């Protein structure tokens, strides 16, 4: 059965987050193409992700990307869910890392939600992906194949469904995505929202945020 992301408060002192612009916390673009920064983030993320041990059995699989990107508001909704859960379980007192793991406070989250209310759907282009060859698949075609059980069309394919980066500042961005094994329709291998951080001119995975749906 297809497992997609489910779209699913505690106030902190904004003084802890002075490095972020409180009046315009995110650069939210609805452009029809990726910026250089967005392209670097996406490519560094997928390149690093697909090198993990969990994908070693899929190294020869074709890479297919769902043409219609997940909307960026998925990232902020998952971040908010994960933050609320973290707080409710008293992990802050145990680990003392609210600032390191959750760099946005309630007010900043709300501002992002408002800005993303009328977000357009971005459509990926093959040229967006620099480090590997991909093919594109329309979301409706994916649904049709799964509903009719024609999984043979996905034989030896990894399917990636991801959002454009949600830029926080010049060094931090969120991305949501799910990677699935096409042999069983779209059996999830991994899914999350990740905080990407620029380190030595490369974008690295720093923190992960889950939406409460587990495989």
Image: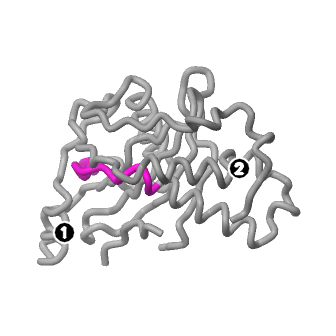
16 over 118 or under it: above or below: above
The residue to which callout 2 is attached is: 101
* Left or right relative to 145: residue 181: right
Mark 1 is surrounded, within 10 Å at the Cα level, by few (under 14), some (14 to 19) or many (20 or more) other residues, namely: some
Q: Magenta span covers which residues?
A: 61-74
In x, y percent, where is residue 197?
59, 35
In this orientation, which residue lies closer to the viewer: 106 or 7? 106
Residue at left offset 61%, top offset 21%: 200
Question: Which of the numbered marks, if any, corresponds to residue 195?
Answer: none
- The image shows a total of numbered marks equal to 2
Label 2: state its secondary structure. helix
Do residues under tags 2 and 1 come within 8 Å of each other at their CB atoms? no
31 over 190 or under it: above or below: above
In x, y percent, where is residue 130?
32, 28
The colour mode here is one colour
Residue at left offset 46%, top offset 33%: 41
Mark 2 is surrounded, within 10 Å at the Cα level, by few (under 14), some (14 to 19) or many (20 or more) other residues, namely: some
42 inside magenta stretch: no
In x, y percent, where is residue 148?
12, 77
* Left or right relative to 186: residue 36: right
Indicate which disc, 2 or 1, sits on the residue closer to the N terminus: 2
Q: Quadrant of the N terminus?
A: bottom left
Label 1: state its secondary structure. helix
Question: Which of the numbered marks, if any, corresponds to residue 143?
Answer: 1
Residue at left offset 68%, top offset 50%: 105
* Displayed quadrant of residue 22: top right
In this orientation, which residue lies closer to the viewer: 199 or 117? 117
Q: Report, in whole angstroms, how far the alpha carbon at label 2 lies from the one at label 1.
A: 35 Å
Residue at left offset 23%, top offset 44%: 123
In x, y percent, where is residue 204?
57, 36
């Amino acid at each position: 059965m297809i497992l997609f992301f489910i779209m699913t408060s505690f106030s902190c002192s904004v003084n802890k987050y002075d490095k972020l612009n409180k009046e315009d916390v995110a650069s939210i673009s609805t452009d029809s193409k990726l910026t250089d920064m967005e392209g670097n983030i996406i490519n560094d993320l997928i390149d690093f992700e697909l090198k993990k041990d969990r994908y070693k059995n899929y190294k020869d699989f074709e890479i297919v990307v769902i043409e219609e990107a997940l909307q960026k508001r998925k990232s902020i909704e998952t971040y908010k869910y994960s933050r609320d859960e973290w707080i409710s379980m008293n992990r802050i007192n145990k680990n003392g890392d609210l600032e390191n793991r959750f760099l946005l406070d309630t007010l900043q989250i709300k501002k992002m939600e408002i800005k993303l209310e009328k977000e357009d759907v971005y459509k990926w282009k093959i040229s967006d992906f620099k480090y590997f060859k991909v093919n594109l698949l329309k979301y409706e075609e994916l649904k049709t194949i799964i509903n009719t059980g024609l999984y043979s069309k996905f034989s030896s394919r990894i399917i990636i469904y991801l959002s454009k980066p949600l830029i926080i500042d010049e060094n931090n961005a969120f991305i949501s995505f799910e990677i699935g094994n096409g042999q069983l329709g779209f059996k999830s291998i991994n899914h999350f929202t990740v905080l990407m951080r620029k380190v030595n001119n490369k974008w690295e995975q720093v923190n992960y945020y889950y939406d409460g749906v587990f495989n």
